Amino acid sequence: MRIDDAKLKALISGAKKAGLNAYAPYSSYEVGAAVMTDEGKIYLGCNVENASFGLSVCAERVAIQNAISNGERRITAVAVATRDKDMPKPCGACLQVIAEFADESALIVTISENGAYDVRTLADYLPRPFKLGVD
Ligand code: THU
């Protein structure tokens, strides 16, 4: 899947902006995510932690839930921004949720603290996602 520069920039700035709303008092690891739909719309999300740690939700899943609850069904790219000096990697749970709504060619864009970014496909991270045969 190809993405033009303007869309890539919009995704990256959306993910960074969403990270400003991160609620991460327990880990201090603030994450923002932006997902792009098949029609080029962007939905944002941030991580939302909880005192009962297991209830915390990653930014990617919040962004996807935002898109889906606004009626979207197909995702073509996901961007994840952190203030980590190392390049972040989406967690396995988020990859499985992305795979529910995206083809293996969907782009995963990760962004580190200094603005460096990395573009790979969903298949690079999760080549054989679990599926139940529902399209
Ligand atoms: N987190 C995300 O939001 N996305 C990821 O891909 C990995 C981890 C969040 C969850 C938790 O709030 C914090 O980062 C530390 O794990």
Image (cartoon, rainbow, N blue to C red):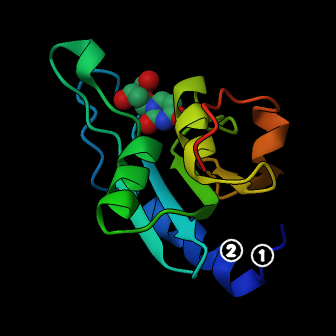
Horizontally, is 119 left or right of 50 in the view? Answer: right
Q: Residue 29 is drawn in which quadrant? A: top left
* Within-10-Å neighbours for mark 1: few <14, some 14–19, many 20+: few
- Can residue 31 be seen at all in this image of the molecule? no
Horizontally, is 54 left or right of 14 in the view? Answer: left
Q: Residue 67 is drawn in which quadrant? A: bottom left
Q: Judge by depth and name the residue closer to the eye, 118 or 131.
A: 131
Q: Residue at x 49, y 61 (%)?
A: 34
Location of residue 75 with respect to 8 vertically, above or below: above
Q: Residue at x 47, y 45 (%)?
A: 60
Horizontally, is 120 left or right of 42 in the view? Answer: right
Q: Residue at x 55, y 71 (%)?
A: 37
Q: Residue furthest left?
A: 51
* Residue 114 picture location, percent across and down: 64, 53
Q: Which residue matches tag 2?
A: 8
- Looking at the rendered structure, the kind of residue marked 2 is Leu
Q: Residue furthest front?
A: 133
Q: Quadrant of the N terminus?
A: bottom right
Give the label on residue 83, or none. none
- Can residue 58 be seen at all in this image of the molecule? yes
Confirm or reject: label 2 Cβ below 8 Å from ligand 1: no
Q: Which residue matches tag 1?
A: 3
Front tag of 1 and 2: 1
Quarter, ligand 1: top left
Q: Marks 2 and 1: in contact by CB < 8 Å?
A: yes
Location of residue 20 with respect to 47 vertically, above or below: below
SS at mark 1?
loop
Q: Judge by depth and name the residue closer to the eye, 50 or 111.
A: 50
* Residue 92 picture location, percent across and down: 60, 25
Horizontally, is 116 left or right of 84 in the view? Answer: right
As measured in the structure, the alpha-carbon distance from the residue carrying label 1 to the one carrying label 2 is 6 Å
* Residue 31 picture location, percent across and down: 43, 43
